Image (spheres, rainbow, N blue to C red):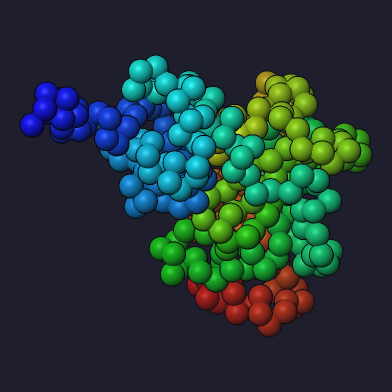
Amino acid sequence: MSWRRLLVMAVLASGCGGTPQVRVSDVENPAVLEHYLGLMVGGDPYTLGVLSGSDRGYVIDADRLATRRSGLDRLLNRYLDRRHLEWDSLLNFAAAAYDRIRQMPDHVDQLHKDLPADEVLMFEVHGPMTRYLRRITIPKSALHQALNAFSLNRRQLVYPIGTTIVARHLDDSVPVETTAMYKRPDGYWEFGTYDRAGRRVAATHANPRALVTPKQCVGCHLGTRLFEPEKSFPAPAPAGPDGVRHWYTSARDPVVTQLFSEHERRSDTVLGLYATVYVTDLLQARQSGIIAQEEARLLTDLGL
Ligand code: HEC
């Protein structure tokens, strides 16, 4: 056997030159790492063998990444420090990859297109994302499906694939920008921001802070920090440093709030109190004798 051949075999046996294993250093949030790689490869990156590891260290298999999505390995290479990917570089790599992997439409008019107005549920809140009033819309069928499967999903609210949640920012009732989340066929939520004209943009208005998409979106949505006004609900929240924090609801119910623990549990990356507010409204409707049969059944199934 020639020395050259021996050298090749030694290199392969040592693991380099075969599968390029990229170690990610100082992983601040494993959920964010899984989220980004999941979006890149269109499925659970652990099951697909693209990501492995535990708290002691995470490794990306760049070859498998390339097999699932060609070209991403070359993009990844630009962010490497030898075989290492620093946490900040991972975030920058993911931001650069986002444009190649996104599925959300380019224009805001495409969101909730073809959905009749009475098929959409509307909520309003002053929250931590912006000083503008946020008007959030969710397809009624999506919330119904999440509620119907609540027990089956071990008290988690899981939205169906294809759900889009749209949040318009209103300045004195005038829509000035939109943020949205779309649950893709691979099960991962994608984040998007649109400007006043409805075009996709990189960040929200600095009111008071510009939120860079998707970097800052996943920071909160995949993190564990609790925010006002959800944290205090059903009690009213104190005003934040940037102004009022409030869910505009007709009624608040401690039992329903506790049942879903929606913000704290954040079962599906979703932070708002949609089930809590909607089901409380249904209880009121039942009390007033104006509830539809399907909705009355929903309450009974929830044990309410
Ligand atoms: C400071 C933390 C924070 C950041 C950063 C953030 N969000 Fe949110 N987001 C929330 C909270 C809390 C809610 C629930 C109530 C609300 O709308 O204020 C929410 C709600 C939403 C909703 C409605 C669905 C849900 O989860 O309740 C969408 C859509 C959304 N955010 C998109 C985005 C996008 C897009 C970005 C990035 C541009 C982003 N968010 C950044 C905290 C955050």
Nearer to us in this view, 271 or 57: 57
Residue at 58% across, 30% down? 95
Screen quadrant of the N terminus: top left
Q: Is residue 217 left or right of residue 70?
A: right
Locate residue 281: give its quadrant. bottom right
Q: Is residue 7 above or below residue 43?
A: above
Q: Nearer the viewer, residue 8 or 85?
A: 8
Residue 129, percent across and down? 68, 32
Answer with the quarter of the image where residue 194 lies: top right
Instruction: Tell me if residue 25 can be seen.
Output: no
The relative height of residue 46 versus residue 212 in the rendered view (above or below) is below
Residue found at x 66% / y 27%: 212
Residue 186 falls left or right of residue 60? right
- Total number of numbered discs in the rendering: 0
Q: Nearer the viewer, residue 211 or 137?
A: 211
Q: Position of residue 233 (x, y in %)?
A: 60, 44
Residue 211 visible in image = yes
Measuring from the top left, give residue 22's x and y in whole percent. 34, 29
Residue farthest to the bottom, as pictured: 293
